[in-house]
Image: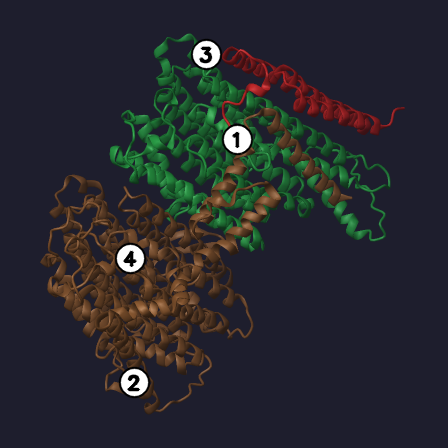
Amino acid sequence: MESNLQLWLIPTVPLLGALWNGLWGKRSSERAVASVAVGAVAVSFLLALRAFFALGDAPYLESYFSWIAAASFQAHFNFYLDPLSAVMALIVTGVGLLIHIYAVGYMSQEGGYYRFFCYMNLFLFFMLTLVLAGNYLLMFVGWEGVGLCSYLLIGFYFRREDAADAGKKAFITTRLGDFGFLIALLMIYSTFESLNYSEVLPAAASLPVESTAGPLTVICLLLLVGAAGKSAQVPLYVWLPDAMLGPTPVSALIHAATMVTAGVYIIARSSALYVHAPQALFMVALVGGITAFYAATIGIVQTDIKRILAYSTISQIGYMVMACGVAAFSAAIFHLMTHAFFKALLFLGAGSVIHALGGEQDIRKMGGLRHYLPRTYWSFLIACLAIAALPPFSGFFSKDPILWEAYVSPYGGILFWLLGILTAGITSFYIFRLFFLTFHGHSKTAVATSSGIHVAEPAHHGVPHESPPIMTWPLMILAALSLAGGWVGIPALWRGGDHWNLFLAPAFRLAALPTEHAVSHDAATEIIFTLASILVSVAGIALAYLLYCRRPELAAAAAARLRGLHTLVLNKYYVDEIYRSLFVQPLVVVSRELLWKGMDAAAIDGSFQGLANRTRRLGDRVRRMQSGNIRSYAGWVVLGAILLISFMVGLAS
Amino acid sequence: MPAWNLTAILPEAILTVVGIVVMLLGSFSSQNQDRGCRTVTLMGLAGATVAVVAQRQHQGAFFDGMFLVDPFGIFFHLLFFLIAALVVLSSADYLQAEKLTVGEFYTLLLFGTVGMGLMASANDLILSFIGLEISSLASYVLVGFRRGVASSSESALKYFLLGSFATAFFLYGIALLFGATGSTRLTQIQEILRNVSGRATAGAAGTVLLPTPSTLSSLAQGPEQFPTALLGLAASLLFVGLAFKVSAAPFQVWTPDVYQGAPTPVTAFLSTGPKAAAFAVFLRVFLVGLEQTADQWSALLWVSAALSMFIGNLAALWQSNMKRLLAYSSIAHAGYMLVAFTAHSVDGTSAVLFYLVAYAVMNLGAFLVVTHLGNRGERYVEMDDYAGLGYRSPLLAACLTIFLLSLIGIPLTGGFLGKFYVFRSALQADLIGLTILSVVNSAIAAYYYLRVMVAMYMNAPERPVPLEPVSSSVGVTLFICAGGTLWLGVFPQSILRLAENAAQWLLGAG
Amino acid sequence: MVPLSYYLILSAILFGLGTAGFLFKRNIVTIFMSVELMLNAVNLTFVALSYHFRQLDGQIFVFFVMVVAAAEAAVGLAIIIAVFRNRGSLNVDQMDLMKF
């Protein structure tokens, strides 16, 4: 191992790119802006590659200077390189590089070119800080920073009111989760007297497994809250579908490949804590499993191409979280990587479709695009096969271990396996529904009505056209990765070397199952399970083919037959409404009964908006306290004084 | 050491003399002596700072124990001088544009600072009261400094009437505490109350005898019970007066109106300087003097902290006037500081001190941007006037963004570490409910700060708002504030060490 | 000899009267005088306690409070005049340019 890797350069280079474009980009040509931004990411990628190959057996730590050195609290600026963070850094910079290149073509003529690349580079800076940080506090810096960039990029189309609202929704929802993280961080410090991974993780590994809820369990649950916010897990997932209002490369980079997987990363990073808190681990698995299944079912009936992909992302991250929950951390990170490839590809392909159709996003209005967009078509197909987990595509090799572990792991069980396999079937169904509706059938887009997100896009070009090479090349590279990316982890069962697990093993050494009662299963069982999951995937594809390609009328009939269920799912299980009645209504009742009478219940719409409106309304009542009249102010003072006095004197006597 | 020693009040003496000089300079010289006044004022502040730094070698109690020179007081003195200097630096353009008399303005600022200094170092409640009044009287006048403007004189009236009303409560509290313990000296009160509670636990039979050291006496002459009810009454009256000054709920009602009507540099001063001074007295009175009755008043603090955060943040959601928005936000920030105060620990106290510094820097900066954009006559202080600022003046917008991010509490800014320490101390004191409430509040607060950022970066201006070029003094102040905010976020040790030292002294010295 | 409690109760009543005056009077000058009444109620407390304790501290405090009250009166009247010039009224209920 080299003595000094200068890890700090990896995030700093994109930061410099962001600064350059932020300060001088406005006056530079698009070409200059793009080369600075892409160049910065490319350098960062090469540096990450160098770090990757320099990786030794033991984790490598670089400490720069002390950040907080109070008597009772210490934190440093330090970076930490182990297989886990090296892989993450490679994914972030590698996929980030491809998406940057794609965006060079996609964002041209969009306006705000320099601003876009400035934010994107800034995002990479924070994301790499998050991934490489050597302690929880520095990770939190990255954690908050990516949220901020995500907010800026969702609201990128600033003339659109709903985009700005979606940005705020994302920022504030994830912030609730962030505070779970923050409190967890404080508790980690009070338990371990340190925030450095290199001290916390070994210390946690030496603690006994908590059979009842103790401090570790609380820490782990709080971390889960943070992860659920950032990774859009139940119940904090509501922001991600709305986040799709941002530009498509942003959806691909931030809301599919990197930022939203930060929750998985933090759980994997804290694996040593989690395996000592089995109850928290169970909660993780439960949250992940439920999210995976639940979001997949919503994906079936959505009609907006990006929203389908958004729910699909939520569902796939649910898989990863579930994998963490059954202590299959390396499988989770494996799926994180392959998902980054194929989901980025799906988003970029969708962007290519939207681009070709002049902003159309409704898949019911698409069809027959395979002839117009051949390169997009083929790469999209590979991504679909990958997410549907058919061999030999990458998704197969990453999803299969998760399902297997969900069954055999001491923390797993048949329930998680069932959730996983059902989700797998639904996944292949909805993704091929999307695929067939978009690329097969008759073209319905002779006249594409431009009502979608590309406001700046000039009117349709008559016939849909393939995107320029700068956009299709990244698609093809990602397609190759989606196909072959999984081969590094072919398990021994399939005559592979199981390189992935061996490589990541040092990162999870401290999370070795403390109670090693691994039930041995013979190869035959494993093969049967694998065949079952392949079968389910194929069935999903076949059903989608039947309903949306061969007999389209059947789909409508099925929807009509199952009207109740269909409406239920179409309305996203009425979660918005349930949130409203669970959280918003009580607030209304309380505020009406306790604070004011006669509140009009009219202004309730949607959970978040409703909650926001309620809060604002509450604020309105509060500010009425400020009548402007001095005597009424004095009245408040006296009232407060009387309450205080009666409390204090009452307490004393 | 002699019983009285003028070096103890050297900083205050310097400022008083300089204040008088500036006042004379202002009235006897021609119109164009503004720069001279400013230089003299800044030099006075620098001299006072040097004096304070020199005082670190001569710590102790002076004037028969009335006046303390200790790390706690020194910390606050330095903070006050920093605030005053920044306000002086930044207000020159404003005063010129509004055609206000420069000499008097600076003089009042200096006198206010003297009062604040006395408050921070007072060990005797009467001295606290006098300091409070000196700083208040100066601020009453400053608030009404735009004499010809109806809203300015109206806020001066509101501030004056309600302020003196609240001060009367404070004074009554002092009198009753004097009655209960026979002393107004905080350290003596602390000892007396310690003895009382010591006897109470020792004398299980119930005969609580008065601890009568020969010089001290109290209402509880003879064998009857110590007047705990009177003590509670005194504590709550003191609480009213101090909570009013830090604008904590439910005594915050005056804040938005006064902040809105006052000249913007004065608002910046009020929201940082006198507030910090009131916190200094608050901490001294309750953590030193009334330390023994902590289990009673901590409940008050708990409620007040929660109410302040909610009232401040909820009402801010509706504001479109930037000054009023920042006023409500200042109520909420007082709430966060009270959360750390409630923790009643060294960590909590140092969190309050650190937060005060971070808040001073970021809030002064934010108000400075508001001042600058307000233009002549403070015409452009609505949020709509900020639309498109990100394109028209990127640097100004970038500075305001830093301040707003810090007010939200995003990492790498002072505001984040401030909140971080607050939450940490609250959790360590097992104030889990209060911590959760503050967490919820910081989420609500993000919403209205973001609205400003949305306006700056994501809205197109509806009407052209004139933008004056940034003068060098404003630029320097902005740079100090923005740099300071980031500096506190990245290299907080130095300030934090000072704060911790001060907090340890306060809680350990008694 | 009049017991101490009589003085204390009297000053509490005076303080209460001052508070009530502040709350219920409309003329700004009257309101200001109510504040002065509150301060003097406190002064009475100080003097009574000082006499009771047989020490001078409390009486000296009274002088301080009187000085402060005088300064306050000077500033206050100036502010009241400024308000009157701007608004032409001394009715406190009309002073609500800023609210909510």
Chain that bears disc 4: A
Q: Colour of chain C?
A: red
Query: Cβ–Cβ below 8 Å for labels 2 and 3?
Result: no
| Crowd band around label 4 with a 10 angstrom C-alpha radius: few (<14), some (14–19), many (20+) | many
Q: Amino acid at mark 2?
A: Leu
The residue beneath circle 4 is: A254
Number of callouts: 4
Using the rendered image of the protein, determine whether residue A83 is visible from the camera's viewpoint: no
Q: Which residue is mark 1?
A: B255
- Tell which chain the image draws in green: B
Quarter of the figure with the C terminus of chain A = top right
Residue wearing tag 2: A531
Q: Are marks 4 and 1 on the same chain?
A: no
- Report, in whole angstroms, how far the alpha carbon at label 2 lies from the one at label 4: 34 Å
Q: Residue at x 49, y 50 (%)?
A: B439
**Which residue lies most toward the right here?**
C1
Disc 2 secondary structure class: helix
- Closer to the camera, B256 or A140? B256
The disc placed on residue B24 is 3
Find the distance from the CA under tag 4 to the CA under tag 1.
Answer: 42 Å
Q: Crowding near pointer 1: few (<14 within 10 Å), some, many (20+)?
A: many
- Residue B331 lies, in percent from the top left, at 51, 37
In-front residue for pair A540/A560 = A560
